[in-house]
Image: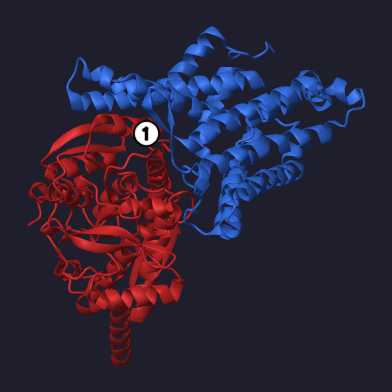
Chain colours: A blue, B red
């Protein structure tokens, strides 16, 4: 096991974490500010992937596809918020889960209706398609490096938005006391629409960026959604910083578990059962991590006591 | 009194003709959600064959199982108990087939599988009313193992998702493959990021890669593999290279070798008719799933021509004879009602703007599955 392989796996873990962060940042904002469980967040991720694939195929430009994914997912977010989500704030979480689960089905079948049942083609832009050479003799896909950079840039942008801008002040205020914010004259309905659209845009961006190296198909959002929920529970609901730390923690744990556990078991047991047990345990590892965090910090790593 | 008797006799004759005339097929397949492309292809292939045969005595009821075993079981119960179907078919996934098939055959219905071929149903769990028209799950993987030998690969890195069909896949590959293993990995079902696995492949010193990652998992793996700069030859089963998926993989799949019991360039009249009619009807190239649906329907029609479905023994014998023009060319059933057929080696090519496959050789000839001996039928 060379140093280069370990370093490459650390990069992989970081990249997976950053990708999860893009997905969970929106989810945690919506949950934290609006108190809403949005299962349809994965559908917005899918909308981003499909729009990027369709526009990139039509125009030949991945950048245009990305822009369309951002704008389209945000627009879908506004539409969904105004038509459906707005009626759910006063209701309990079970109603929200039910309504947003219905949205998943509507989005999935709607997407099939428009784009057909077969996966769409979306490839990374030609300039980023090959590997780049890094120190230690690592060959790393250029596009994955770009995802890491883009994700960290989004994290920085969100941090500036929340801590340094007027909108950020309102978002934080809305998180701690929505009645008081409304009483001070902030249009809370408008604020919620903005936050929801922002979350949707981030999900759409993630869907487009990730769709290029994975597959753009119906139902692509749901597996990521489950991981994103794990991330925000670990990081503390409502905390963007928690989402970043949680996402990188989950990404690293998952990648390193998949990489290290089977050989670890192979040191003291027969090879074929070691691969089976090692991979089974690796797929449980992030949930074990979540349980562990919740035992010591029931509010998550950065969750405020409520 | 005499008139009454005549009337009754006429009525009885009429009822009897009614009974011989109509065969009702219940199709339970996946038409929504992530795996819908496969079910839609099976359905379209099946319906194309019924349309071309122009039979008005064959009725097909189609329902969507949403890829959920519980829903498939409910649909099967409804079709058997209230719709009164004679034959069930359509299920794509092995776990759904395991939930539906044993109870359907126990209730005296025929089940013809157009796709899933779990080893239990080929071996100890085989049943006289269960027929598999596609393949036993291990078959395409076994052909890939045989191909690896003939290509002189001696150090394969193999990976598949950690679920029964994934374990069957690697078992099937290893059954035929004679070389060393550079590594063996079980990934998570539904996993879409393979960076960690690809890094291990790069570091393993393998001379070839075999993977079974159906659907979106395969698209993700192939694209990421192509971008990683690892350039070892890749082999896979047709499930990651079917017509529905290839367009989404693009150039990353070009030249990849895969194994299949069918391809659109198999040279026989039935196949030429099928490929042309499918394109004319649906405006896309057929996949292997569509070919399996088409063969399933033609098998049923061939049995209807010689036997009455209500005479189960005669109808079963007619199915066993498999007297229809399969798009695969030679096709016959083994004693456990699973196909004995050639499995081909294909290569992904680009025809104009469309990615598709062409046959480059035969992996296994007249291949039967490994479980037939465990089956009590003979």
Specify the quadrant of the image occupied by residue A148. top right
From the viewer's perspective, is residue B254 above or below residue A99? below
Circle 1 is placed at which residue position? B188
B168 lies left or right of A73: left
Asked if residue A303 shows in the view, the reply is yes
From the viewer's perspective, is residue B13 above or below residue A271? below
Q: Residue at x 39, y 68 (%)?
A: B285
Q: Residue at x 23, y 32 (%)?
A: B205
Is disc 1 placed on a helix, strand or loop?
A: loop
Please name whichever residue, A201 or A32, is drawn nearer the observer in this view of the structure: A201
Q: Residue at x 39, y 35 (%)?
A: B194
Q: Residue at x 31, y 42 (%)?
A: B231
* Chain letter for mark 1: B
Please name whichever residue, A241 or B294, is drawn nearer the observer in this view of the structure: A241
Q: Position of residue B190 (x, y in %)?
A: 41, 39
Give the position of the C terminus of chain A as an image quadrant: top right
Give the total of numbered labels.
Answer: 1
Please name whichever residue, B43 or B148, is drawn nearer the observer in this view of the structure: B148
Q: Position of residue A220 (x, y in %)?
A: 50, 43
Asked if residue A219 shows in the view, the reply is no
Give the position of the N terminus of chain A as an image quadrant: top left
Q: Position of residue B149 (x, y in %)?
A: 13, 47
């Amino acid at each position: 096991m060379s140093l280069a392989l370990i370093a490459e796996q650390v990069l992989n873990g970081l990249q997976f974490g950053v990708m999860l962060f893009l997905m969970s940042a929106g989810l945690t904002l919506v949950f934290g500010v609006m108190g809403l469980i949005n299962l349809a967040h994965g559908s917005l991720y899918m909308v981003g992937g499909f729009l990027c694939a369709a526009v990139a195929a039509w125009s030949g430009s991945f950048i245009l596809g990305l822009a369309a994914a951002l704008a389209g997912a945000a627009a879908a977010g506004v539409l969904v918020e105004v038509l459906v989500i707005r009626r759910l704030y006063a209701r309990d979480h079970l109603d929200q889960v039910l309504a947003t689960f219905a949205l998943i089905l509507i989005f999935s079948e709607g997407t099939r209706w428009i784009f057909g049942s077969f996966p769409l083609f979306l490839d990374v832009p030609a300039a980023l398609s090959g590997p780049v050479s890094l120190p230690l003799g690592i060959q790393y896909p250029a596009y994955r490096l770009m995802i890491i950079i883009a994700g960290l840039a989004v994290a920085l942008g969100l941090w500036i938005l929340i801590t340094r801008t007027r909108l950020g002040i309102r978002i934080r205020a809305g998180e701690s006391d929505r009645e008081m914010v409304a009483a001070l004259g902030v249009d809370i309905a408008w604020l919620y629409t903005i936050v929801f659209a922002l979350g949707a845009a981030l999900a759409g961006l993630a869907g487009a960026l990730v769709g290029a190296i994975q597959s753009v198909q119906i139902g692509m959002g749901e597996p990521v959604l489950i991981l994103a929920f794990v991330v925000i529970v670990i990081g503390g609901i409502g905390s963007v910083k928690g989402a970043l730390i949680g996402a990188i923690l989950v990404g690293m744990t998952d990648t390193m578990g998949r990489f290290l556990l089977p050989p670890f078991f192979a040191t003291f047991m027969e090879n074929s059962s070691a691969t089976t047990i090692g991979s089974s345990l690796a797929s449980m590892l992030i949930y074990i991590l979540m349980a562990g965090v919740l035992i010591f910090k029931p509010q998550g790593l950065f969750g405020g006591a409520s | 009194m005499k008139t009454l008797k005549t009337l009754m006799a006429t009525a009885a004759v009429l009822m009897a003709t009614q009974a011989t005339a109509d065969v009702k097929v219940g199709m339970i397949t996946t038409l929504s959600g992530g795996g819908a492309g496969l079910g839609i292809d099976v359905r379209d292939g099946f319906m194309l064959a019924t349309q071309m045969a122009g039979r008005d005595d064959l009725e097909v009821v189609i329902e969507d199982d949403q890829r959920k075993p519980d829903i498939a079981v409910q649909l099967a119960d409804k079709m058997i108990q209230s719709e009164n179907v004679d034959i069930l078919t359509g299920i794509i996934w092995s776990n759904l087939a395991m939930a539906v098939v044993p109870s359907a055959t126990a209730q005296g219905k025929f089940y013809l599988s157009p796709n899933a071929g779990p080893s239990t149903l080929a071996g100890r769990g085989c049943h006289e009313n269960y027929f598999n028209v596609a393949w036993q799950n291990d078959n395409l993987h076994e052909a890939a193992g045989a191909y690896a030998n003939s290509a002189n690969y001696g150090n394969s890195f193999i990976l598949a998702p950690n679920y029964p069909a994934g374990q069957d896949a690697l078992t099937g590959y290893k059954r035929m493959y004679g070389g060393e293993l550079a590594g063996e990995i079980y990934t998570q079902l539904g996993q879409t990021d393979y960076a960690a696995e690809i890094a291990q492949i790069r570091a393993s010193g393998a001379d070839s890669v075999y993977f079974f990652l159906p659907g979106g998992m395969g698209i993700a793996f192939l694209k990421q593999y192509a971008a990683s700069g690892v350039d070892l030859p890749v082999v896979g089963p047709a499930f990651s290279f079917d017509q529905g998926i290839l367009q989404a993989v693009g150039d990353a799949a070009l030249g990849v070798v895969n194994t299949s019991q069918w391809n659109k360039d198999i040279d026989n009249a039935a196949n030429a008719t099928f490929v042309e009619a499918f394109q004319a009807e649906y405006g896309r190239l057929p996949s292997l799933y569509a070919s399996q649906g088409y063969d399933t329907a033609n098998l049923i029609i061939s049995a209807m021509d010689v036997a009455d479905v209500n005479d189960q023994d005669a109808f079963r014998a007619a199915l066993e004879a498999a007297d229809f023009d399969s798009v695969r060319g030679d096709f016959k059933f083994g004693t456990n009602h699973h196909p004995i057929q050639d499995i081909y080696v294909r290569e992904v090519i680009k025809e104009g703007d469309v990615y598709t496959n062409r046959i480059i050789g035969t992996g296994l000839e007249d291949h039967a599955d490994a479980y037939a001996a465990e089956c009590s039928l003979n």
